[in-house]
Image (cartoon, grey):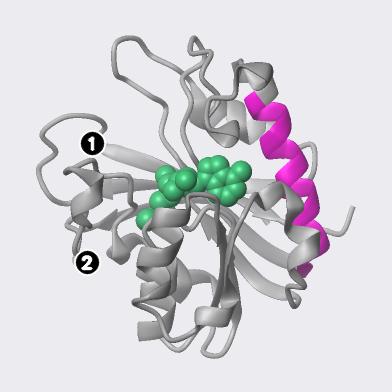
């Protein structure tokens, strides 16, 4: 079944940003995660986030009776989130590309806001800028590999949502569209939810896209 929906949610952040971020906002808003949990999950479901960042998925899941699991590569962010959650053993520090090693259970739902990369940049955020892994093609291929592995931990017909913007800083970069095409090689692209932010946006996009995939099991 195709998904083509429009959602209006608050882009106000309800959780504090740690001092070490120096005001650099990298999170998706809790209201978006909450709306997507309502749409795709039920109480007690296991929810996976391969790029935990500052823990929005964990915080919202714990508030809403879902069981969060996730991976974060940055140790400082990992430790900050771990101190603030009760499901401490469900959070791992490492590379999502190695998720098979973490002994995760089968998941009912996956949601994330991945590290963003404009197509003209060399610096690959999935490898923390390691020059051996420069470039947008390497980034898209790695995202594909990571989602190939995630699908092996998802229940059949489970949904996976990737929140991504087409980037508008400096020059337009079609990240959401490119991720849609790259990731549809390893799972079924069911459609999109276009999200309209309800609060004024000072810079950046007025809206975002949630790409909705389904794990059809190959
Ligand atoms: C956009 S942020 C996620 C923000 C999160 N949704 C939130 O609301 O806090 C992406 C995160 O992915 C992490 N990351 C980058 N490469 C990674 C990898 N290979 N495996 C796991 N995490 C990674 C970054 O350190 C960053 O914290």
- Residue 51, given in percent of the width and then of the height, sits at 53, 52
Give the magenta range: 139-155
Q: CA distance from mark 1 to mark 2?
A: 21 Å
**Which of the numbered marks, if any, corresponds to residue 21?**
none
Q: Residue at x 38, y 68 (%)?
A: 81
Q: Quadrant of residue 34?
A: bottom left
Residue 86, placed above or below residue 90: below
Left or right, 156 with reference to 77: right
Tag 1 residue: 206
Can you tell which quarter of the image residue 152 is in? bottom right
Q: Is residue 37 above or below residue 51?
A: below
Task: Name the spot of residue 49 as percent of width and height, x first.
Answer: 55, 61
Label 1 residue SS = loop
Residue 31 horizontal side relative to residue 141, left or right: left
Q: Is residue 192 left or right of residue 184?
A: left
Q: Which label is found at residue 15?
A: 2
Name the residue: 29% across, 65% down: 31
Q: Nearer the viewer, residue 139 or 192?
A: 139
Residue 153 covered by magenta stretch: yes
User: Residue 102 at x, y = what percent?
Assistant: 73, 67
Q: Is residue 213 visible?
A: yes
- Does the numbered disc 1 mark a residue whose Cβ is under 8 Å from ligand 1? no
Residue appearing at x 69%, y 73% in the figure: 107
Residues packed near mark 2 inside 10 Å, few (<14), some (14 to 19) or many (20 plus): some
Residue 187 visible to an observer of this rendering = no
Front position among marks 1 and 2? 2
Q: Nearer the viewer, residue 121 or 101?
A: 101
Point out the tag, 1 or 2, that comes first from the N-terminus: 2
Quarter of the image that includes the N terminus? bottom right
In the image, residue 131 lies at what x, y percent? 61, 17
For image coordinates 58% across by 77% down, the residue present is 90
Check if residue 68 falls in the magenta segment. Answer: no
């Amino acid at each position: 079944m195709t998904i083509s929906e429009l959602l209006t949610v608050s882009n106000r952040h309800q959780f504090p940003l740690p001092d070490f971020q120096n005001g650099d906002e990298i999170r998706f808003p809790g209201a978006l995660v909450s709306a997507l949990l309502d749409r795709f999950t039920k109480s007690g479901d296991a929810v996976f986030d391969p790029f935990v960042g500052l823990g929005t998925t964990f915080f919202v899941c714990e508030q809403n009776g879902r069981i969060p699991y996730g991976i974060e590569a940055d140790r400082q962010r990992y430790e900050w989130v771990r101190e603030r959650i009760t499901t401490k053993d469900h959070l791992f520090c490492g590379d999502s590309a190695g998720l098979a090693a973490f002994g995760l259970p089968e998941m009912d739902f996956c949601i994330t806001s991945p590290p963003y990369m404009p197509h003209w940049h060399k610096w690959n955020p999935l490898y923390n800028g390691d020059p051996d892994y420069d470039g947008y093609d390497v980034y898209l291929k790695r995202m594909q590999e990571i989602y190939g592995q995630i699908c092996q931990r998802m229940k059949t017909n489970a949904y996976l949502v990737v929140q991504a913007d087409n980037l508008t800083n400096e020059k337009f970069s079609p990240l959401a569209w490119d991720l849609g095409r790259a990731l549809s090689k390893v799972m079924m692209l069911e459609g999109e939810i276009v999200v309209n932010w309800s609060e004024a946006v000072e810079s950046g996009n007025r809206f975002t896209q949630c790409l909705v995939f389904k794990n059809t099991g190959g």
